[in-house]
Image: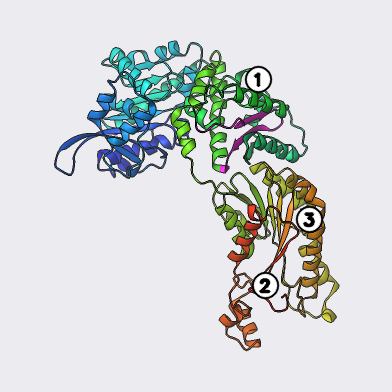
Amino acid sequence: MKSLWNDQDAAKYKTDLALRVYTSRLLGQNPSLVLHGGGNTSVKIRQDNIVGETEDILYVKGSGWDLATIEEGGFSGVRMPHLLKLAQLSSLSDSQMVNELKTQMIRSNAPSPSVETILHAILPYKYVDHTHADAVVTITNTAAGRQRIEEIYGDRVVIIPYIMPGFDLARLCAQEFEKQKGDNTVGMVLMNHGIFSFGETAKESYQRMIELVTEAEDYLKQHQAWNIPQKVVNVPETSLNHRLAQLRQQVSIAAGFPVILSLQQTEKTLSFAQREDIATISQQGPATPDHVIRTKRTPLIGEDVQGYLKAYETYFKSHLAQAKDSKTMVDPAPRVILDPELGLCAIGKNTKAAGIVADIYDHTIDIIQRATLLGGYQALPPQDIFDVEYWELEQAKLAKGGQTPPFTGEVAIVTGAASGIGKACVESLLKRGTAVVGLDINEAITDLYKRPDFCGVVCDITDETAIKQALETAVRQFGGIDMVILNAGIFPASSPISALSTEQWRRIMGINLDANLVLMREVHPFLKMAPKGGRMVVIGSKNVPAPGPGAAAYSASKAALNQLTRVAALEWGKDKIRINSIHPNGVFDTAIWTDEVLETRAKNYGLTVEEYKTNNVLKVEVTSHDVAELAASMCDSLFEKTTAAQVPLDGGNERVI
């Protein structure tokens, strides 16, 4: 493992706490050391308080912060004397411990101190680093794990048997550290959990972590347990879209809410899922207790998903008695599914959660296979896994929760999403927690948003193959499709019927009508499997109820689409799919309404531009945002008993009225 320490960079950090930030970020940059908020670091500092008294303060990583991006404000300062007194108690519940930590914080707006704060306090070193290094966890997760750790490190590390994080772990570490420490001690290994290093300087503690982990990696290499052989049996080149969507539907039912299912179909995941011993090695438990909270139990394997889900339900109910005092129950749905054709399916309440699961299990695959090569993977016993999952601090976190956006775990497709109304629809849906797939012929769609819950796909909607490929992308990325907003279309230059060419007529019909028919037909099977029922919103036009001269092709195409929508509402009602239309007028913040066009049109009516924009009964301007918000609302519970509705959004048009 390569050290990332740079003397020139380090020189920019002038204080002990600043150097703590620097080395914490170095650790956080390496996913084989820490993943998604895992790991912990601290520094002990003497400083004066507001009344001039000198205090010993432990600055420890605060809850919710990631080492890769942590700042000074991400560390909680806690008074050391009280922490050392707490470590001497014979017992202390974790909830009491959390309360005690908060009473000793020196800054009221700091994040809550880590549950390992007391553990960091009792270690007699200025800087303390803690990671879940893959190599170390691999070795400790074997039958002879302790003996191997002793063989690697000798008397340079203190070895602590596994115990759940919290006060009991801190108390045990305090006792064992005093017994085992010596002149050569530079670190501590928590079995099935991770490794600590420490030093009097930030550099010393960091470098020791790198050196200790490198020794573990070298040990695996020396025992031919580093390079993982991969063998993939050819997977049939058949569409897996419907199977993925059905799988997501089943898991969502088990969870009780919609989930994101992200397909990780790589050579690595397929090779692992196709192992002959997969039913054994994948069911031993997670690599560390930290992963229990994020990935929830062991993966589902095989094709009988419904059977496995029933088995999980049985497991869940059988433990209700043990968890009867919990205010919030953990749902019984899995977070990882392994399949010989799919590879790895990562599941989460949203795209961020699914991404965390995917990253963690990607590392777990390496840990399991290397431990197997080393003599056999052996994780925590089932009861320990259950105890962590129903840990009182985790339950309190779940109970506290927070307001969940209404479309969390759901997936939407928006056509014509690169600009105008389509882009506004994307924004409205993302704000509500939706994972969005935006389709547009404009290549700018791929860079519209750089975030995990958006996927931009360049797609000519008049190309049936392109539409099918776009749907496949959506399902592979997020697991299914719950909502569709049909927005893409063109508004051609004004032309009387007498001058309307057949070619122009067919082009407008092809984009505004035919393409939408194909998309509706192809997306219907996925909307049927939407956990909360499928929803479709069609962006129509004022020209449907009130056509204008010179817009024959446009008006006819939108009217035909409107009729198609009504038929779809009749046919799809039995599938719990609702479809409604919006008929906007005069949405002037779109690309077709340039300043020049606006000035010309306003002049024709003898109006100023502002008067022209509000030339309706209510004297208001209709924006893309207005249309998008109504479209999103039509997908929400407000319209859950409405289908085939046609809602004008025009400020009141006299001809429509």
| Highlighted range, magenta | 327-351
Foreground residue, 503 or 357?
357
Please give the name of the residue rendered at 47% of the width and 14% of the height, measured from the top-left corner. 145
Please give the name of the residue rendered at 53% of the width and 29% of the height, measured from the top-left corner. 363
Q: Amino acid at mark 3?
A: Ala
Helix, strand or loop under label 2: loop
Which residue lies under the disc numbered 3? Answer: 569
Q: Is residue 6 visible?
A: no
- Find residue 552 and report its horizontal and vertical position in percent: 80, 75
Foreground residue, 133 or 318?
318
Q: Quadrant of the N terminus?
A: top left
Q: How many marks?
A: 3
Which mark identifies residue 279? 1
Q: Amino acid at mark 1?
A: Ala
> What separation in Å lies between label 2 and label 3 (alpha carbons)?
23 Å
Give the mark, 2 or 3, whose residue is nearer the N terminus.
3
Q: Residues within 10 Å of mark 3 (few under 14, many from 20)?
A: many
Which residue lies under the disc numbered 2? Answer: 585
Q: Is residue 396 left or right of residue 284?
A: left
Foreground residue, 484 or 317?
317
